[in-house]
Image (cartoon, rainbow, N blue to C red):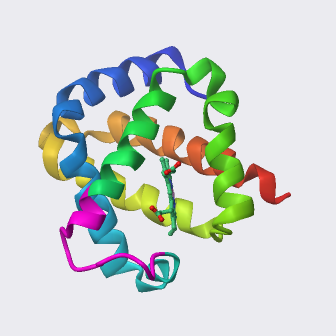
Amino acid sequence: MLTTEDRRILKQSWDKVSSIQEELGCESLTRMFVVYPTSKTYFPHFDLSPGSANIRGHGKKVMKALEDALNNLDHIHENLAELSNLHAYNLRVDPVNFRLLGRCIQVSLATHLKSDFNAQTYAAWDKFLSCVGDVLAEKYR
Ligand code: HNI
């Protein structure tokens, strides 16, 4: 459950990186493919070399979806419903991967926010990204 303070921290930290969200998405996906190579199996049609145009374009879509979710925290299930269907029924992504990408997004945030990515910021993003992962995985049950 995101507290009022978590929400404030999420908004404040997102405001600092929203202008570089495409870069953040690209870095996070590139990191996921390097650190967790099994995640590559879902993207056989992509050029997966670090920073490729495919990764950059996809990173932009993922971060835009996260921005929309951040702006609709009270309606996150409705907001992510279509993506939840897509990932469960069409793409059949093993839900464990949502946690892995979440971790990579946190590392990217930390590298950009530096000392602003403190324990409270980490905790707020951890809650938010876990929540997004849970919603994306809920159709599997
Ligand atoms: Ni995901 C497509 C959002 C995690 C594999 N994904 C999308 C799209 C968005 C998106 C947005 C584009 C939908 C469209 O075009 O209509 N994905 C998200 C979000 C997360 C996430 C917000 C979690 C934070 N996706 C993952 C993970 C994997 C994944 C962890 C697999 C490891 N996603 C895919 C694949 C596609 C995809 C595969 C289709 C890509 C394509 O363009 O063919």
The answer to whether 94 appears left or right of 60 in the picture is right
Quarter of the image where one finds residue 63: top left
Q: Residue at x 18, y 35 (%)?
A: 116
Q: Residue at x 18, y 28 (%)?
A: 16
Q: Is residue 56 above or below residue 123?
A: below
Per the rendered image, the range of residues in magenta is 43-56
Q: Is residue 45 magenta?
A: yes
Does the stretch in magenta take in 38? no
Regarding residue 57, the answer to whether it shows in the image is yes
Nearer to us in this view, 65 or 3:
65
**Measured along the vertical axis of the image, is residue 75 above or below residue 43?**
above
User: Residue 42's spot in the image, x, y percent?
Assistant: 52, 76
Q: Residue at x 35, y 21 (%)?
A: 11
Q: Main secondary structure of the magenta part?
A: loop
Q: Is residue 134 visible?
A: no
Q: Going by the picture, which residue comes out furthest to the right?
A: 141
| Quadrant of the image containing the N terminus | top right
Measured along the vertical axis of the image, is residue 8 above or below residue 98? Answer: above
Check the picture and name the quadrant holding the C terminus: bottom right
Residue at the spot 35% in from the left edge and 61% down from the top edge: 104
